[in-house]
Amino acid sequence: MEKHSKEFLYELLTTPSPSGYEQPVQRVVRRYMEPYADSIESDLHGNLIVGLNTKASRRVMLCGHCDQIGLMVRHITKEGFIYVGPLGGVDVAVLYGANVTIHAKKGAVSGVLGVKPIHSRTSEERDKQKLDIEKIWIDIGAKDRKEAEGRIEIGDPVTFKLGVTELSPDLLSGPGLDDKVGLFVAMEALRLCAEQKKPLPVALYSVGTVQEEVGRRGAITASYGIDPEVGIAIDVTHASDNPGNDNPRDTTIRLGGGPAINRGPNVNPVVDSMLFAAAKKGRIPHQPLPSPRLLGNDAYYLQVSRAGVAAGSIGVPNRYMHTQVEVCSLKDLENCAKLLAAFVRSITPKTDFRPS
């Protein structure tokens, strides 16, 4: 991966963007994409829309949601401990003992998620610990409520402590890879298209969508505003190449195996065929991913926007989703961006996305 691309990725991963509070990461995207874009706009919802060749009549939308799961401060005890509610699909099982950051107006506040020590638990509690977010608290080292309220406020968002761990030259780990890697891919695909001398056959809009983790809300408004003919969602998908995969009949998705191309009722058949053809022509590693049900990502709403959109979905293999140690492959990110750029370039005036 090119140095500037990797630096952009790492800045995304170390910038907070809990659902509803995505502005800091959108500023990072805006700054990075300015040299490559013909237009960059934010809508009222907070989506960041980066356009290339925007005067063309046919419009293609690529989107990766920029929000990450998190928590929200909802109560401060008289002793200065903080109780929270979930922002998105938080796995309570991985919260105990985690390092977190409260993103307060006055600045970031470090904290730890408290847990009753094993020494103090009853035998029943040790055997079956109840996974209840109501019993989770954050300790910021405040001596009482007054001190805590001097540093944070009710409603402040919380994330896992952000950072990147390099497990190998190709594999990185950290919180928020879901779906900042998809955001990265959407923007890198546009950058690749912008750097090619051949004129782009369509108007391309790469969008950092907001609030996917709380109902795929940003994709609804962004797709309505852009009104694309084609829309492709880039999100993470479960990598099954680890001991957590206990169903031998599931399709195996491997880290480093390339983008997972979704197939199923949420995908336009012409888009499906063109994605596989582009991967084959460009010798880009890829993996088929059967999806018999509607997808749980932005493609769900892209497909039914206005009078309908020719929808597709690319999955970035991800281990340990919705934890603070998600794992992805840099090669997969590069190949996802290359595939999408090749797909966009393969559209011609004669391309008809209507199923026949």
Image (cartoon, rainbow, N blue to C red):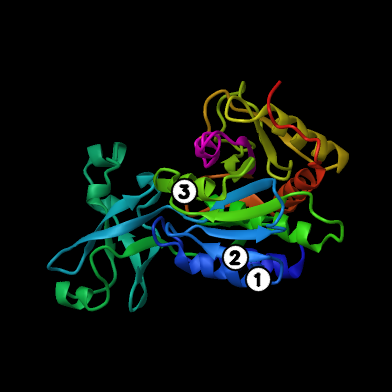
Q: Nearer the viewer, residue 39 or 107?
A: 39
- Residue assigned mark 1: 34
Q: Is residue 235 visible?
A: yes
- The disc placed on residue 291 is none
Within the image, what quadrant is residue 239 found in?
top right
Question: Which residue of the protein is positioned furthest toward the left in this rendering?
Answer: 78
CA distance separating discs 1 and 3: 23 Å
Q: Residue at x 81, y 34 (%)?
A: 277
Mark 2: few, some, or many residues within 10 Å (few <14, many ≥20)? some
Residue 100 position, x and y percent, is: 39, 63
- Secondary element under disc 1, as helix, strand or loop, is loop
- Residue assigned mark 3: 221
- Secondary element under disc 3, as helix, strand or loop, is helix
Q: Nearer the viewer, residue 57 or 314?
A: 57
Label 1 vs 2, first from the N-terminus: 1
Q: Is residue 339 above or below residue 304?
A: below
Residue 178 position, x and y percent, is: 53, 50
Highlighted range, magenta:
296-316
Nearer the observer: mark 1 or 3; the answer is 3
Label 1 vs 3, first from the N-terminus: 1
- Residue assigned mark 2: 40
